[in-house]
Amino acid sequence: MPATVTRKTLMDMKKDGKKIVASTAYDYPFARIADESGIHMLLVGDSLGMAVQGEANTLGVTMDQMIYHTRIVAKGAGTAMVIGDMPFMSYQVSMPEALTNAGRFLKESGASAIKLEGGAAVSETIRAMAEAGIPVMAHIGLTPQSVHQLGGYRVQRDRSRLIADADKVEAAGAFAVVLEGIPAEIAEEITGSLNIPTIGIGAGSACDGQILVLHDMLGISAGHVPKFVKKYAELRQNAMEGLRTYIDEVQNGIFPDKNHSY
């Protein structure tokens, strides 16, 4: 892995057939862990609304919250590319407001790029940002900020619309595109048709890379996780076991002992 992952790194990886690996991150400790593990990209997703804040969806996350979390993730990232998620209504109201918010995001957060949701409908916004020197990752398919419009977290199967969205965001200047909640065969077709990398989440194995929510894949989240999530650890259970042992030792006078006292 190079000293720092850049847009060129990602393009070269697609060209060479090397898979891109990404995860979310919301704080400094986990950003360091993920970065030191070799993750290529860290997305500070507005999914923090659900993963960190305990909300039912991502809609209430603010610009100030996103900038704060992205800034502390950027401090923990050494080689990974840090991407900040533009929250709901930070880029939909008007083009000037979208450009102002995106520019502020990069200036204040330390991120290398921003991500926004939507396909053809936001292609001109992507174009304006790219022309202003703001690197943009697009996001099509299941777009969580449109959860109410989509009627819930549903797999998106409209092949013609998805292909058109992918073509539009690439033509507008996006350097990569997240494909979420898309049938594998459609995601494979899109990946083969684009020059920019595709990053899949619930979109099959043919994408140029994959991303998962850190709290899901490491077993931190409680309750339901989507079908596409594979758990690679059970940190919630491990933490509870450690805390219960701590409680037991304190209550029974085992901790602190001589080795943990001055």
Image: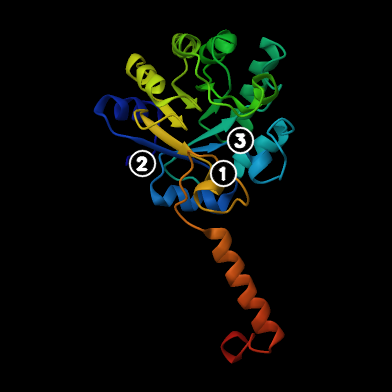
Crowd class of label 2 (few under 14; some 14 to 19; many from 20; radius 10 Å): few
Q: Tell me if residue 196 comes above or below residue 70 in the rendering.
A: above
Relative depth, front residue between 220 and 105: 220
Position in image of residue 162 (x %, y %):
48, 14
Q: CA distance from mark 1 to mark 3?
A: 29 Å
**Tag nearer the camera, 2 or 1:** 1
Crowd class of label 1 (few under 14; some 14 to 19; many from 20; radius 10 Å): some
Q: Earlier in the sequence, mark 2 or mark 3?
A: 2
Relative depth, front residue between 66 and 224: 224
Asked if labels 3 and 2 touch by Cβ distance under 8 angstroms, the answer is no
Kind of residue at badge 1: Val
Question: Which quadrant of the view contains residue 59?
Answer: top right
> Is 175 placed left or right of 110 in the picture?
left
**Tag nearer the camera, 1 or 3:** 1
* Image quadrant where one finds the C terminus: bottom right
Relative depth, front residue between 195 and 221: 221
Residue at image point 64% right, 20% down: 150
SS for tag 2?
A: loop
Question: Which quadrant of the view contains residue 154?
Answer: top right
Can you identify the residue that label 3 sits on? 109
Q: Residue 3: which disc?
A: 2
Kind of residue at badge 2: Ala
Position in image of residue 87 (x %, y %):
66, 28
Q: Residue 225: which disc?
A: 1
Q: Tell me if residue 225 comes above or below residue 15 in the rendering.
A: below
